[in-house]
Image (cartoon, rainbow, N blue to C red):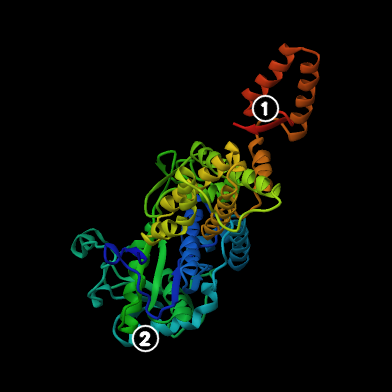
């Protein structure tokens, strides 16, 4: 099955056929750097990180561009509130964004341009639009003429007449039509400004992305991505100004990720359910956040809550526990068959499950990047590994050790395409334990001390005290695991 993607422009799935295979150009709208990033930003960037990784895995040579919007009303207003220069504020939050993305395990894009570093390219496009009578200057501002572009609203499928009926020209605006949008804004006192043919000013938001995408990918490229909230007006306006300037299609495929709700409500600061990535990572491992997001299709809405993240963490822990069991078992074996031979019945089915997992993984991802189904296929192999490692019937069937070895390798290799299972299993499980103790008032040292006390109580046949320690820890989310090798612990 060849890759098919849902193209917002066409309103359905279609075969992915790049303009110049195997090269692929992909532009994703980045953040406006005036504050710390939230869970919605995490989702968008993880989604397109996966698109980037999978296209590379599928053999494409991908040029991935993700910008920084580093001049904007929000940046200017926040800088004024803090009494600092807007450039200083933007640089602060660019660093914060990069730190957040690194913590979430993102692959770095090929290029990460800043709007303020591409003012000449922006001015050139605006001049081109004015020369074609697609834009006009008005007292230092420049506006795009939406009525001069026949295909306006082709992305969002909105009705122009209905939108015009509700549109108004605000006081102080100098545009001819209420739907016209700013390409260039005249300078205001105390704001950053650059010289232009229309006087000092700064670019509008939409023209920045057109200029940066065309600078690195050309006038027509393969994929333009972003959140659904950007379809209108941002992406709609990008198409209008870019295609009006160049008289050719802008981006071929438009991909948009779904919204993030918080506890079944739309996330917003006014509702008090606004969480930054940094706040979330104080309680949850970054890979848990990625795993949670990838368990849903990228176009579907997801409901963010502590409970849903805890459930994702529990599922990821089970996978890592199975991987660790497989690694530890394989480490004890002196020799393993080159191939899984001599297997019959259900054991042969386990071998076939492993050998066919890459094909099933590819089929899932080729269906519009269905990460939820792809993870499901990997989980089937993980269950098989767990069965082989725990039932121990491999002792009579050496071929199963080859299945275990190959299955482990496939889960790690294919999981890596999704940015998962990149940490050694034992290390990840220990890290998850420490995070899970946040808020319990317990530390690993305290738990080990209680285990030692319980061992003494059991040795002295003080079973009441032994049970009390076990039950007290269980109430605080810590389960004791007794075995012939001693007592360990894990989180509920």
* Quadrant of the snapshot with the N terminus: bottom left
Q: Image height check: is 189 above or below 357? A: below
Q: Nearer the viewer, residue 64 or 291?
A: 291
Residue 122 position in % (x across, y down): 45, 80
Residue 474 position in % (x across, y down): 63, 24
At x 60% / y 56%, what residue is drawn? 100
Dot 2 crowding, Cα within 10 Å, few <14, some 14–19, many 20+: some
Q: Image height check: is 488 above or below 161? A: above
> Which of the 4 image quarters holds residue 487?
top right
Residue 407's disc is none
Residue on which the image places disc 1: 480
Residue lying at the far left in this picture: please name it.
161
State yes or no: discs 2 and 1 in contact (Cβ < 8 Å). no
How far apart are the two marked residues, 2 and 1, measured between alpha carbons?
A: 71 Å
Which of the marked residues, 2 or 1, is nearer the chain's N terminus? 2
Q: Nearer the viewer, residue 402 or 105?
A: 402
At x 50% / y 59%, what residue is drawn? 45
Residue 128's disc is 2
Image side of residue 446 versus residue 481, left or right = right
Residue 338 visible somewhere in the drawing: yes
Residue 405 position in % (x across, y down): 60, 53
> Which of the 4 image quarters holds residue 256?
bottom left
Image side of residue 287 versus residue 1, left or right = right
At x 47% / y 64%, what residue is drawn? 54
Q: Image height check: is 48 above or below 174? A: above
In terms of secondary structure, where does tag 2 sit?
A: helix
Image side of residue 75 versus residue 457, left or right = left
Residue lying at the far bottom in this picture: please name it.
131
* Quadrant of the snapshot with the C terminus: top right
Residue lying at the far front in this picture: please name it.
342
**Which of the two discs, 2 and 1, sits closer to the camera?**
1
Dot 1 crowding, Cα within 10 Å, few <14, some 14–19, many 20+: some
């Amino acid at each position: 099955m060849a890759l098919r993607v849902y193209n917002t422009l066409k309103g359905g799935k279609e075969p992915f056929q790049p303009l110049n295979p195997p090269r692929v150009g992909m532009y994703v709208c980045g953040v406006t750097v005036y504050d710390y990033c939230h869970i919605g930003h995490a989702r968008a960037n993880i989604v397109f990180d996966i698109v980037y990784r999978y296209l590379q895995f599928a053999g494409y040579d991908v040029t991935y561009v993700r910008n920084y919007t580093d001049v904007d009303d929000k940046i200017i207003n926040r800088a004024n509130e803090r009494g600092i220069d807007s450039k200083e504020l933007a640089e602060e939050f660019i660093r914060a964004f990069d730190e957040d993305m690194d913590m979430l395990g993102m692959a770095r894009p090929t290029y990460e341009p800043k709007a303020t570093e591409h003012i000449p390219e922006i001015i050139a496009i605006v001049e081109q639009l004015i020369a074609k009578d697609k834009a006009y200057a008005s007292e230092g501002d420049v506006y795009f003429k939406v009525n001069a572009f026949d295909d306006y609203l082709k992305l969002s499928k909105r009705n122009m007449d209905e939108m015009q009926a509700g549109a108004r020209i605000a006081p102080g605006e100098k545009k001819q039509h209420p739907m016209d949008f700013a390409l260039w804004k005249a300078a205001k006192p105390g704001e950053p400004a650059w010289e232009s043919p229309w006087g000092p000013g700064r670019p509008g938001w939409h023209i920045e992305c057109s200029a940066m995408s065309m600078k690195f990918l050309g006038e027509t490229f393969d994929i333009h991505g972003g959140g659904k909230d950007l379809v209108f007006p941002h992406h709609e306006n990008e198409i209008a100004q870019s295609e009006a300037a160049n008289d050719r299609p802008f981006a071929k495929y438009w991909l948009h990720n779904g919204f993030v709700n918080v506890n079944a409500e739309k996330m917003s600061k006014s509702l008090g359910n606004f969480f930054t990535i940094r706040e979330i990572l104080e309680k949850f491992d970054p890979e848990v956040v990625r795993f949670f997001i990838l368990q849903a299709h990228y176009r579907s809405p997801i409901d963010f809550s502590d409970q849903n993240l805890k459930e994702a963490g529990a599922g990821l822990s089970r996978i890592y526990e199975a991987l660790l069991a497989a690694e530890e078992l394989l480490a004890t074996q002196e020799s393993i068959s080159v191939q899984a031979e001599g297997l019959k019945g259900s054991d042969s089915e386990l071998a076939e499950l492993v050998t066919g997992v890459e094909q099933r993984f590819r089929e899932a991802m080729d269906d519009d990047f269905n990460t939820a189904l792809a993870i499901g296929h990997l989980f089937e192999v993980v269950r098989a590994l767990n069965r082989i490692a725990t039932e121990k019937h491999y002792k009579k069937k050496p071929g199963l050790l080859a299945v275990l070895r190959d299955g482990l390798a496939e889960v790690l290799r294919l999981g890596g395409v999704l940015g998962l299972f990149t940490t050694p299993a034992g290390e990840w499980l220990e890290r998850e334990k420490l995070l899970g103790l946040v808020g319990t008032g317990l530390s690993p040292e305290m738990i080990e001390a209680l285990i030692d006390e319980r061992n003494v109580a059991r040795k002295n046949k003080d079973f009441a005290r032994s049970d009390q320690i076990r039950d007290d820890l269980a109430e605080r989310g810590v389960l004791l695991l007794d075995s012939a090798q001693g007592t360990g612990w894990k989180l509920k």
